[in-house]
Amino acid sequence: MKAIGIGIVGYGFIGKVHAYSCINLPMFYDNLPFKAKIVGICDTSQAMLDKARSEVACAVYTNDYKQLLAREDIHVINCCTPNIFHKELLLDAAKSGKHIYCDKPMTVTLKEAQEVVAAVNDAGVLNQMTMEYRFIPAIIRARQLIDDGFLGDVFNFRITYLHSGYIDPKRPLSWRMDKAISGGGALLDMGPHPIDTIRYLLGDFDRVFAITRTYIKERPSLEDPSKIRKVDVDDVAVMQVEMKNGCMGYLEVSRLSTGMNDDLRFEIHGSKGALAFGSMDQNWLLAYDCRDPENPIGGMRGFKKIETVQRYPAPCSFPGPKFSIGWIRTHVASLYDFLTHVSDGTPTHLTFEDGLQIQKVICAGYESAETNQWKTV
């Protein structure tokens, strides 16, 4: 059994998700060909390091990620830092010969993304973006149906990713709302998931026309709530898009969608059928088949619920195909996919090149919003 040592850089929310996924891989998959072990955790916050120490048993806890890069027993770096710190870590990890698993977005600018892709290609290290929505069985099934021609010619689509956590103007200004650290707002933070989902299902983007808005323009400082700071990133972004295959669509991301929690939903319409999905009920893929008879009185026409639930292929064994799937389960599946490639020494299929293509769409969106013009991706 091959040992894969992992160093997690950043132990905030997403760092904890990555740690959970690593620790629990043997519970979900039988006869793993590798043994993944968290060797070290890095965070610049001593409080977060103390939290990591109480939750994850590993060899080293440090505020300097270069200590992780120097260890021969660490083979993979998990990048879970705030956005602005991604580039330096990814470049240094590649130079150190570490394989890299990176949470979105890959970087904050297109130039940085291009530098990172060149660096990992030159170093020959395996790399993968943490696009966990690709690992929802319903979305995997949607891709299969599209590849099989179920939709026919695709005409148009709508995809939205909606949160409501920022609707309270008294919520303090965190790093995600500070452009100096985040690099952008809803489009950069949330946009990678719907962008990647549509790329996965329908191929590359051609051009976009975007509008961004900052509705809550001031918030209390996180460090001192009595001080008010300006918000310099977008709360909401909407885009009209044209794809290279000729279809057109609508993409929306929002942190101010009152009544929503974490809802990625899409509808795709074609000449022979349609598909629909919503992540708040991700046990089902909805499919409409124009080839079904429509008579008498509607015949058998209508959207059908395909029970994708947790029907992952072997060697997945837990908790079973019939049980409701949850959000964190897809993170486990994503990490399993990456580490399987690391163990086998085979190329990954969700690489930093995909992260670069996502970055192109985001940057084109921001340029379009600034100029009020269509922008080619």
Image: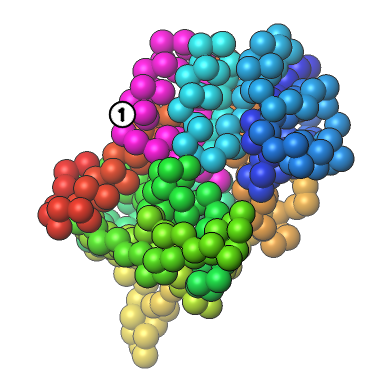
**Quarter where residue 297 is shown:** bottom left
At 38% from the left and 55% from the top, the residue drawn is 233
In which quadrant of the rendered image does the N terminus lie?
A: top right
Left or right of 59? Residue 273 is left
- Residue placed furthest toward the left: 373
**Quarter where residue 346 is shown:** top right
Which sits in the foreground, 8 or 215? 215
In which quadrant of the rendered image does the C terminus lie?
A: top left
Does residue 235 show up magenta in the picture?
A: no
Q: Residue 366: percent from the left, percent from the top?
A: 27, 50
Left or right of 90? Residue 291 is left
Which sits in the foreground, 304 or 284? 284
Relative height, residue 222 to residue 128 (above, below): below
| Label 1 Cα neighbours within 10 Å, binned few <14 / some 14-19 / many ≥20 | few
At 56% from the left and 11% from the top, the residue drawn is 97
**Quarter where residue 8 is shown:** top right
Q: Residue 76: percent from the left, percent from the top?
A: 63, 22
Relative height, residue 314 to residue 256 (above, below): above
Which sits in the foreground, 72 or 132? 72
Specify whether residue 80 is in view. Answer: yes
Count of numbered badges drawn on the protein: 1
Q: Secondary structure at mark 1?
A: helix
Disc 1 designates what residue? 111
Left or right of 67? Residue 119 is left
At 62% from the left and 48% from the top, the residue drawn is 330
Relative height, residue 48 to residue 344 (above, below): below
The magenta stretch is 105-133
Q: Residue 114: percent from the left, percent from the top?
A: 33, 25
Report the amino acid beneath label 1.
Lys
